[in-house]
Image: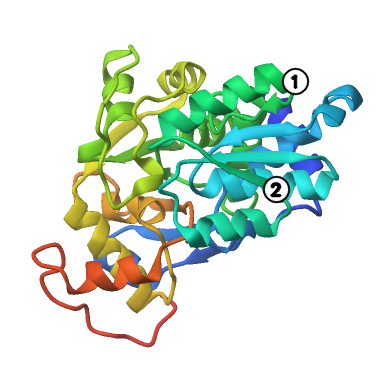
Amino acid sequence: MQYQDIMRAKYKLEGHIHRTPLAHSKTLSEKSGSDVYLKLENLQKTGAFKVRGAWNRIAHLSPEERQRGVITASAGNHAQGVALSAAQAGIRSTIVMPIGATAAKIAATRSYGSEVVLHGANYDEAFTYANEVAERTGAIFVHAFNDSYVIAGQGTIGSEILDELPHLDAIVVPVGGGGLISGIGLAVKSIRPETMIIGVQPEQAASGYRSWKTGQLQRVEKPLSIADGLAVKQPGALPLAWMRRVVDEFVTVSEKQIAEAMFLLLERNKLLVEGAGAASVAALLSGVLPLAGKRVALVVSGGNVDLSKLAELYTSQPVIEAPIPMVQSLG
């Protein structure tokens, strides 16, 4: 995979996704001592960045592969990204979701025209079944992160950021399976090698962090986090190889820090952001990164949060110790 692959993806994505805003945040700048910008992928189609990689993968299918359709396993943002992309391309799609997937996510995925199959008690069982179906039917499996076309699609975010902020000191990126940070890192390092690429994962779901530190794939059997989009048991082998090349620093954040970042974004910036999307903000505000006085972009990767769970989180203790005062400011 090369920088040119990201540029080709950028061309193919035109007209199919939103070019999301890169918004300056006065609030976060004052709190951190950095000059902070938010790349708002929570405002992307389907509410998350995943549609970029899904569309790029589907756009590269051969005519014969298009006839076979696509299949994937997901209980969240990737499911909707694949469903929408397949619908736009006019091909069949099947999404295997765990039996416990929320009714809202099932309905959202079906609304794009996909066939939803409920199978397995968790993502791993759904993933295994989806691959079995792919082998049996010939459908093309679209992996959420361990795929070069998917990684290139996610990398278009890095290119868009540099289009607006060419002299950027650092980009902080949430990490689950590693596809997002791999693509962004390749895009940015190809143009501006001095820009730091910083990954962030929840402390309780830190398989990517551990893998990056050791250089070997590490597995967390029960990754638990309010940032469920980052709770991946193990990153992909392909993303890990890229992370080792393009990621300069990697940190973890607590559940409390993620929750506080979610409510800060909601109350100060008027942004509804899921736990995964708020992880970059949590990392900046943790104080562990040497970014004071630097120009920083934070990737807000998604906004698909269950409002009932958000309300429960807000009233729970001790995750949120006190409400953050409301301020009328976009930041």
Q: Quadrant of the N terminus?
A: top right
Q: Is residue 57 above or below residue 274?
A: above
Packing grade of label 2 (10 A; few <14, some 14-19, many >=20) is many
Q: Which residue occupies the foreground of this view, 79 or 180? A: 79
Element type where label 2 sits in the image: loop
Q: Is residue 224 visible?
A: yes
Decide if residue 223 is on the left or right side of residue 230. Answer: left
User: Where is residue 312 drawn, in percent x and y?
Assistant: 24, 70
Task: Locate residue 3, reporting x and y percent.
Answer: 67, 26
Farthest residue to the top: give it.
216
Question: In the depicted view, which residue is nearer to us: 18 or 297?
Answer: 18
In the image, residue 244 lies at what x, y percent?
Answer: 41, 19
Q: Nearer the viewer, residue 305 or 8?
A: 305
Q: Residue at x 42, y 77 (%)?
A: 270
Q: Which residue is mark 2?
A: 114
- The structure residue drawn at horizontal position 73% and vertical position 26%, both measured from the top left corner, is 139
| Amino acid type for the residue under numbered disc 1 | Gly
Q: Position of residue 233 (x, y in %)?
A: 34, 28
Left or right, 148 with respect to 14, comes to: left
| Amino acid type shown at disc 2 | Ser
Question: Are dots 1 and 2 in contact, CB under 8 Å?
Answer: no
Left or right, residue 262 beside residue 203: right
Say which residue label 1 marks.
138
